[in-house]
Image (tube, coloured by chain):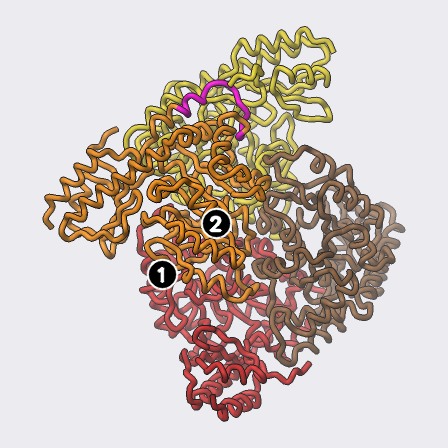
Chain colours: A orange, B yellow, C brown, D red
Amino acid sequence: MDTGMISLASDNYAGAHPEIVAAAGAAAAGTAGAYGADPWTALAEARFRKIFGEESSVFFVMTGTAANVLAIDAVTRPFESVLISDCAHMHMDECGAPERFTGSKFIVVPSEKGKLTVDGLRPWVEREADYHRSRPKVVSLTQTTEYGTVYTVSEIKAITDYAHENGLLVHMDGSRISNAAEALGLDFAAFTKEAGVDFLSFGGTKNGMMFGEAVVFFSHEVDDAFQYTRKQGMQLVSKMRFVGAQFEAFLKDGLWKRNAAHANAMAQKMAEALTRVPGVTLTQPVEANAVFAILPVAMIEKLHKKFHFYVWDNQTGEVRLMASFATTAEEIQTFAEEIQGMTV
Amino acid sequence: MDTGMISLASDNYAGAHPEIVAAAGAAAAGTAGAYGADPWTALAEARFRKIFGEESSVFFVMTGTAANVLAIDAVTRPFESVLISDCAHMHMDECGAPERFTGSKFIVVPSEKGKLTVDGLRPWVEREADYHRSRPKVVSLTQTTEYGTVYTVSEIKAITDYAHENGLLVHMDGSRISNAAEALGLDFAAFTKEAGVDFLSFGGTKNGMMFGEAVVFFSHEVDDAFQYTRKQGMQLVSKMRFVGAQFEAFLKDGLWKRNAAHANAMAQKMAEALTRVPGVTLTQPVEANAVFAILPVAMIEKLHKKFHFYVWDNQTGEVRLMASFATTAEEIQTFAEEIQGMTV
Amino acid sequence: MDTGMISLASDNYAGAHPEIVAAAGAAAAGTAGAYGADPWTALAEARFRKIFGEESSVFFVMTGTAANVLAIDAVTRPFESVLISDCAHMHMDECGAPERFTGSKFIVVPSEKGKLTVDGLRPWVEREADYHRSRPKVVSLTQTTEYGTVYTVSEIKAITDYAHENGLLVHMDGSRISNAAEALGLDFAAFTKEAGVDFLSFGGTKNGMMFGEAVVFFSHEVDDAFQYTRKQGMQLVSKMRFVGAQFEAFLKDGLWKRNAAHANAMAQKMAEALTRVPGVTLTQPVEANAVFAILPVAMIEKLHKKFHFYVWDNQTGEVRLMASFATTAEEIQTFAEEIQGMTV
Amino acid sequence: MDTGMISLASDNYAGAHPEIVAAAGAAAAGTAGAYGADPWTALAEARFRKIFGEESSVFFVMTGTAANVLAIDAVTRPFESVLISDCAHMHMDECGAPERFTGSKFIVVPSEKGKLTVDGLRPWVEREADYHRSRPKVVSLTQTTEYGTVYTVSEIKAITDYAHENGLLVHMDGSRISNAAEALGLDFAAFTKEAGVDFLSFGGTKNGMMFGEAVVFFSHEVDDAFQYTRKQGMQLVSKMRFVGAQFEAFLKDGLWKRNAAHANAMAQKMAEALTRVPGVTLTQPVEANAVFAILPVAMIEKLHKKFHFYVWDNQTGEVRLMASFATTAEEIQTFAEEIQGMTV
């Protein structure tokens, strides 16, 4: 179904990696326990426990929104609040799902290059407890951020230390966690559990799976309850094997890493091409698979004839260009050539 | 991953049909709009509109629970109630998801052979309106029922006529709608839209898909709003193409019918085998792909060494045996031979 | 505003006792901390702690619905269920408030003379835990019941023992708890805390207050959290002093008891009068301030010209007649004379 | 219960006006329909309809939080958002009640002197509809604002015009609406209904009532549904007569106006006294009954020995001083003398 257009719109405009497809297909034969009581799910869960420690718990869900919402619901009561950045996906792009399901207040704090800062959190964390106001319980950060930047381990630790000193838990929205791991050159645990993060939404879809996200808690405390929460949250799929099989393929021999490395490299190439064009400004450091840049309006219009991508801010002309595991070097080459000759 | 056991536990213990797997695989290449703006989803949606009329709206979600809950949420306010049978999946097996998401009261009325009756509805429908009590808005029936029985068109019409006369809408939980269509020898519209049903949860998973259910409204009224509800309900998957491709394969040349016909036939064979065994009583008419029977405890114990199936009622010894598209004639033959020789 | 009609409709058709009115009026002068930080509230809370033990916690709210809903919300998560009787006020007359605010499932079990039984609870309590089904957490009983009957201490203990053996908590909806205490001849603690009840909705309004109900927990566990729940539940009134002052007047020298004793006595007189009338059947034991009886339709029609009361069941002709602290002996005498002469 | 302290903390630290107390007391005798079916409620409702037009609907609730939450719930679906200011009571002081009950997203926009501006609303109102994001439905403004300022009619009209052009409704949180009316020298309708406001929380408690707020819709559209919402929202008190009687006293011959005029005048006197003190800066125009000022820390400490008032902002030393109907000229005189002699 080729339209002749090249998509740099989002990593979820890509399809699925052939190894993922093959793994799901291979899981199709035979009967197996429903709702996760199958061998594929067991294998994938074990794979996660190997990454994050045997004491961690992992649960598969179908969407990134569900991973975030159900994870947070598991550790909050409705009168407790969640501190998120002003560009957080949970704030901007989840249609109020967090508020509706959890009943909690999601409080927006300023971000810098897509990142929370301790100073941004202070006014909400340090004021006196008062039952007229929701009680802060969770800080949630997004890795990679919505602006394609990547928290360093020390940036994460600054937040988790501060949160823990003040009795808060830290959640990471890792819908693009593979891109972050690759960018940091670290394994997953090093910048999550080992950096003080308490629980995690681990993304699969945006990095080459058909569907599937994981919620990981780094201790067993919420374990039993989450089974109920997931069911009540409408996320307990009966043929869980098809998620388990995909995650097993994703994790077992580095497919996640190959996909992320490729996507990140493609974004770098886009950034390099853009920096050579007069009148174009990169607005964010390009650290993973997204490029943010301000382009002249005329250039945007021309590019839109051949490339799908989003104008992020109509006022400034800032656009987002995103690479995925499936973005080809040829596509990026075409993009580079296109913009190189542009005079606006 | 063969355990040597034969599963008659549920139709969702089966995997996925090869044609489904192939269709999903074929959709994996290339970029396409996310969140349903892709050609596979468009094709599948058109297929549904062809079945149920061009004025109908169809939305894909990932679980049967979500289909039921979001469908009902779309047409109710939290102070409005939903009348369901005492054996309804929404009452017994959805962990309070309906109540939590919709905020509505789900009122349980008695069933006969798994079916609602007008007389069962009367006490709740006909009492005086009173704002101390939730206002009835929806009647929901399950087809095939949780007891494997099938509402006839006239049984459905009796309920939809009564509901409409009293200002109520009618929802059908059709997680096994293919089995019902095959059992009735009718097309889908004949016992849904044309019988007065207003909106429908249309199941794919239990009849050979990996994942995927559809919510179908037989008019455009809820259309736009449901897009938001689905997102807020955590059911808007980004790579919707993989649901669309499966439904297209399911519907385009009768795969749904072949699968359902096979499952229903296998259930008939089980029933026939059971009727030949002294001490065994079929407790429900076998009309689709489920068999309910009371077996002596000793027989249950013996059978459980070779076959997975559920004891439905510990008090009475009633069991449920269920066939799927993937149940083989050999498996049923083995079952028949096993019980034939049993003396208890 | 005399209409010439005598109201036997409900104890909340009465106004407020003069001592209550005087106490509220006396609290009107001067400034005091808002939201419960005032001396009247402190006095009333201390009064409750004296009754139920120093380790108990008490919180005032404005409606009986709120007392029930917020009390239960404090000890449940949304995937946990509450077992209630089929005639429970929470089931029949709270418009889905329990479901909406708590997100929990309220499961209806059969009652006898308005009372729960252990056998009625068993099927829901004793089945295997399964995350497809809400996990039972609370049993709620109403004292006096919705049928005007009164649980004995041993009946309550049978339920609380069973509940605790199975890991459940027990709530009492005591919107008419004064009538029960008077009927049993016991102090409040004897048939609540000392009989194993874990938390309580203690009613003031129906026994002579203008407004005001209390939620009492018999340990400090939920204490801090409930302050937030009450605020989030829209029940934290700023001028709490006016509730505190009423409760202080209600409790300090037996006003609650005088009011309840009077109401109960008036109901007995009604019952006596009715038993002397041929064709009338009392349908429930008259143990507190309500009388349930089946009257001939013609008698109902005649009586409705002079008396307000509810037909409870249109099918059977069962009516409810209710006395309050304000029902006068003259009113009951008029009623007795009226029915005595009736031939139908 | 005199502590010797003078309270300038909040208008809800005051008690109730004697005329209010007398009216409630006079309603205590006799039986009357419960839940609002009584003559006092009917009178008060008629009074509101006279003020706001016969086509308007009025419903009484018990707290300001409830008035705001239930009003907004009546006109929104959970996927629709509400735009509020960054200092709105619903954002800062209602413990997440709005989010929890409505399920909606409350979006915070910048304010100037406590007021919303059209420019602040634009980014949320004018961006393209997208079902990943809650759909804006209501703008809510507070009159008087949380900073004691008062929207002029033309400021209100600017917002209501803009809202209506963009398909939004406008709500006014009028917990101090009497103070605003008095400040503007207008009747209630002139700056609400006639200025384009669609529905209103009308406050009674802060201006001399014991309890009681009203929700007023300026057309009949939500009428019937709101009866259910109020019950489900736990705000339907049985002895509504006591709210009705208070509102009748409040409205019938200008008590609201006398109370508000007094409170506003007392605030003016405080402001005048403060402007005469070196080192003190008024931070907001004093337009109603609140004074915001920055005081030297040492002065705050000294004053706190004799006066209750809140430090609004610990960083800047900004305090809030508030007068009520019950604040006496002597108290303000004492305050004026106290600060006059202060050297810091």
Q: Secondary structure at mark 2?
A: loop
Q: Quadrant of the N terminus of chain C?
A: bottom right
Of helix, strand and loop, which mostly describes the magenta segment?
loop
Q: Is residue B163 above or below residue B175?
A: below
Q: Is residue D170 visible?
A: no
The amino acid on which the numbered mark 1 sits, given as a three-letter code, is Ala
Subunit under mark 1 = D
- Residue on which the image places disc 2: A196
Characterize the local packing of mark 1: few (<14), some (14-19) or many (20 or more) Cα atoms within 10 angstroms. Answer: many
| Residue D90 position in % (x across, y down) | 48, 63
| Residue B151 position in % (x across, y down) | 56, 25
The verdict on a common chain for dots 2 and 1 is no
Q: Residue at x 48, y 31 (%)?
A: A44
Q: Is residue C49 above or below residue D179?
A: above
| Residue B194 position in % (x across, y down) | 46, 28
Quadrant of the rendered image containing residue D154: bottom left
Q: Residue at x 26, y 44 (%)?
A: A321
Side of D28 where C276 appears, left or right: right
Q: Nearer the viewer, residue C13 or A229?
A: A229
| Residue B9 position in % (x across, y down) | 58, 22
Characterize the local packing of mark 2: few (<14), some (14-19) or many (20 or more) Cα atoms within 10 angstroms. Answer: many
Side of C204 where A19 appears, left or right: left
Side of C86 where B57 appears, left or right: left
Membership of B45 in magenta stretch = no
The amino acid on which the numbered mark 2 sits, given as a three-letter code, is Gly
Q: Nearer the viewer, residue D37 or B332?
A: B332
Which disc, if any, is residue D163?
Answer: 1
Membership of A30 in magenta stretch = yes
Which residues make up the magenta segment?
Answer: A23-36
Side of B246 where B300 appears, left or right: right
